[in-house]
Image: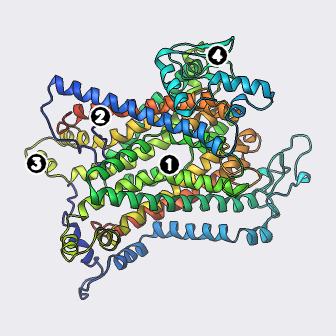
């Protein structure tokens, strides 16, 4: 398993990258993704099923919600298989993802179709339905913000590195430090206070639907995009500046200049290309984490994405939904990491997949 | 435009004197002396450091400050609210000489007192979580780097998993299933302990990665070989030879970790997974402000600005400390 090391391009022993080695690499990495997701699932399972038991709480009561009779609690216990050993429950859950699952208590059977990420007895819906509804919102939020912050952050960082010590550099770095010091939920509230409630420039739709027009989506997501991008752009500007300064000190940059290459080509084709490797590593983690639910941004702007679904599930003690979102988030992070590692090979000629 | 060329002989640099006025006799200085000298000249970092110090004092002497300048943090002052809207009377959220930062909408508690008491939770959780992360990270990082082999593989793999874990989701769900009484602690104590352990636990891989990398390069040095040839055991080499050389990067990282922890604690409190009300916390105040900020923006501005200033101060100080301790630095 090739690891996304902090330094970037540090990879396993180089090997000739024929189509077969790439395939073998892919299989190995997909296996690693699977392991990662299983580890997260097991950890989440432990939290939900073992911790309450150690602390002397009844899980069935937690699952049932607050005002439920003893008989219903026993029904839920049997139906969800909470009386089974944890490993059996774990296995049933894993099996349910590709095969679907039936929750049965005598004649009372609830069917949960194929990608079964669990069944919520609070909303009376399979968890997958909740995830499916929330995904477009989170996806749109993450994609828009990621484009904004990547462009703004990297551009700022590159210019700062090239004009090190200039007024621009100092101003940008002070601004970036300010940006990373701001909690996104505070910036979000300030932005909404000013642009929505005070100036009235933007009208925010309460809750987004797939039926809403693109214009509504755009207007509602505009502030969240900017607020989320602001925080990350600041981080990326700092990171880009630091790596660019490192790269610009390398011998091969001097070589490129010495052989008479134009400054633009030196910067974009030689320096930036190599500086992008560590930036991509972080970008993969960040984008993956965001796709699993931008908890804070979604809560601040009341956007019905995965993060808000999880937060609402927590207040209604809807454990299956929390479990589903956490699992989906882990999957998103693992897959994003895999894609980034594949991208390395495209960007950095030193990297060989092997 | 010339590219800056880094001095690659990093280990020679710490003994070189910094560029102070000409004509002085060259004398050996320890890294500590050089760092302190550089830090004293970095006005921005010093300002950050002083702010941090002030904030720590505010947190420590919170009861005294509140008894002098405010009202008890959990006292309700309904008479300060407009009976119709439940918003503070007067402009700027009810700011006055008596209520320095105004009063809370709906409840009428003194915002200043709650911010002062909130500093205790925020700084306590951030400091202790950083300690947990640094201890675990140093221990595992140094072991991974020094022993290599399967120890390294195992620890590195665990760090990878933790780094790509959906942390915030996991923490809020963890806090939501934990009972109120745990390990003999009750109330605020439980939540503080849980926050410290959880934030620290997810923080250690960041420290661990850095310590591992440093250890990997340090263990090949001659002095380690010398210590080994003189019969030093692994424990001696790890803690007496390697650890002292790791103190600088660990210190820098710990300083830069505190602001991140402050933001995490605020985020968790904002989501309702922090300390339980009525205990005051900055994130919790912003959570309350989310309901009323359209009508009473000041109640949102004070805790938000406090978080911003605190985190910025720690970041400025941490950045300055890093520059000062950097052996490649030229200042």
**Of the image marks 3 and 1, the number of the one nearer the N terminus:** 1
**Badges 4 and 2, same chain:** yes
Looking at the rendered structure, which numbered label has been put on residue A179? 1
List x then y, in percent, for residue A47.
57, 40
- Nearer to the camera, A286 or A177: A286
Looking at the rendered structure, which numbered label has been put on residue A255? 3
Q: Are marks 1 and 4 in contact (CB under 8 Å)?
A: no
**Circle 2 sits on which residue?**
A341
Question: Does residue A270 appear in the picture of this structure?
Answer: yes
Residue appearing at x 76%, y 56% in the figure: B111
Res A67 quadrant in image: top right
- 1 or 2: mark nearer the eye: 2
Residue appearing at x 77%, y 52% in the figure: B278
Q: Are marks 1 and 2 in contact (CB under 8 Å)?
A: no
Res A73 quadrant in image: top right
Res B116 quadrant in image: bottom right
Q: CA distance from mark 2 to mark 3?
A: 28 Å
**Circle 4 sits on which residue?**
A104
């Amino acid at each position: 398993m090739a690891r996304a090391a902090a330094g970037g391009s540090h990879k396993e022993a180089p090997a000739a990258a024929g189509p077969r080695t790439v395939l073998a690499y892919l299989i190995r990495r997909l296996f690693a993704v699977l392991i990662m997701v299983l580890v997260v699932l097991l950890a989440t399972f432990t939290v939900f099923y073992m911790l309450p038991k150690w602390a002397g709480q009844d899980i069935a009561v937690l699952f049932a919600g607050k005002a439920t009779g003893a008989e219903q609690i026993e029904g839920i216990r049997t139906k969800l298989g909470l009386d089974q050993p944890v490993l059996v429950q774990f296995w049933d859950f894993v099996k349910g993802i590709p095969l679907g699952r039936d929750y049965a208590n005598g004649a009372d059977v609830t069917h949960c179709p194929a990608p079964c990420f669990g069944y919520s007895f609070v909303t009376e819906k399979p968890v997958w339905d909740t995830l499916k509804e929330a995904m477009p919102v989170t996806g749109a939020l993450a994609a828009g913000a990621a484009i904004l912050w990547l462009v703004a952050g990297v551009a700022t960082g590159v210019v700062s590195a090239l004009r090190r010590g200039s007024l621009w550099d100092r101003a940008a770095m002070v601004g970036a430090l300010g940006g990373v010091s701001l909690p996104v939920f505070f910036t979000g509230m300030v932005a909404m206070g000013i642009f929505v409630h005070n100036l009235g420039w933007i009208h925010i739709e309460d809750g987004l639907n797939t039926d809403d027009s693109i214009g509504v989506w755009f207007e509602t997501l505009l502030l969240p995009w900017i607020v989320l991008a602001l925080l990350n752009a600041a981080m990326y500007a700092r990171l880009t500046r630091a790596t660019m300064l490192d790269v610009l000190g390398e011998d091969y940059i001097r070589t490129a200049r010495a052989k008479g290459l134009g400054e633009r080509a030196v910067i974009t084709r030689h320096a930036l290309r190599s500086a992008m490797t560590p930036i991509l590593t972080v970008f993969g983690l960040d984008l993956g984490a965001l796709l699993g639910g931008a908890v804070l941004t979604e809560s601040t702007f009341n956007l019905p994405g995965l993060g808000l679904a999880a937060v609402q599930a927590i207040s209604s003690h809807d454990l299956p939904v929390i479990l589903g979102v956490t699992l989906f988030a882990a999957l998103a992070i693992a897959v994003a990491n895999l894609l980034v590692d594949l991208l390395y090979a495209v960007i950095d000629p030193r990297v060989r997949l092997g | 435009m010339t590219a800056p060329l880094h001095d690659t002989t990093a280990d020679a640099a710490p003994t070189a004197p910094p560029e102070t006025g000409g004509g002085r006799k060259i004398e050996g200085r320890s890294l500590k002396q050089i760092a302190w000298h550089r830090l004293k000249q970095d006005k921005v970092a010093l300002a950050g450091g002083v702010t941090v110090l002030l904030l720590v004092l505010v947190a420590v002497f919170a009861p005294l400050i509140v008894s002098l300048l405010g009202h008890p943090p959990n006292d309700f002052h309904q008479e300060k609210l407009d009976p119709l809207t439940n918003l503070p009377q007067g402009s700027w959220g009810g700011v006055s000489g008596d209520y320095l930062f105004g009063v809370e909408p709906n409840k009428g508690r003194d915002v200043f007192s709650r911010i002062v008491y909130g500093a205790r939770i925020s700084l306590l959780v951030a400091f202790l979580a950083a300690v947990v992360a640094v201890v675990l990270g140093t221990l595992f990082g140094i072991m991974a780097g020094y022993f290599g082999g399967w120890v390294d593989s195992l620890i590195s793999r665990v760090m990878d998993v933790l780094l790509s874990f959906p942390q915030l989701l996991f923490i809020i769900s963890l806090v939501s299933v934990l009972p109120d009484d745990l390990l003999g602690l009750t109330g605020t104590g439980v939540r503080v302990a849980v926050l410290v352990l959880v934030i620290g636990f997810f923080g250690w891989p960041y420290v661990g990665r850095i310590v591992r990398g440093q250890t990997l390069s340090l263990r090949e040095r001659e002095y380690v070989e010398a210590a080994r040839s003189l019969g030093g055991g692994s424990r001696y080499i790890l803690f007496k030879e390697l650890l002292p050389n790791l103190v600088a990067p660990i210190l820098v990282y710990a300083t830069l970790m505190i602001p991140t922890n402050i933001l995490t604690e605020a985020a968790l409190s904002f989501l309702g997974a922090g300390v339980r009300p009525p205990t005051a916390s900055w994130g919790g105040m912003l959570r309350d402000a989310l309901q009323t900020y359209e009508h009473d923006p000041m109640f949102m501005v004070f805790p938000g600005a406090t978080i911003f200033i605190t985190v910025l101060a720690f970041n400025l100080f941490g950045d300055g400390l890093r520059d000062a301790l950097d052996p490649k630095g030229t200042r």
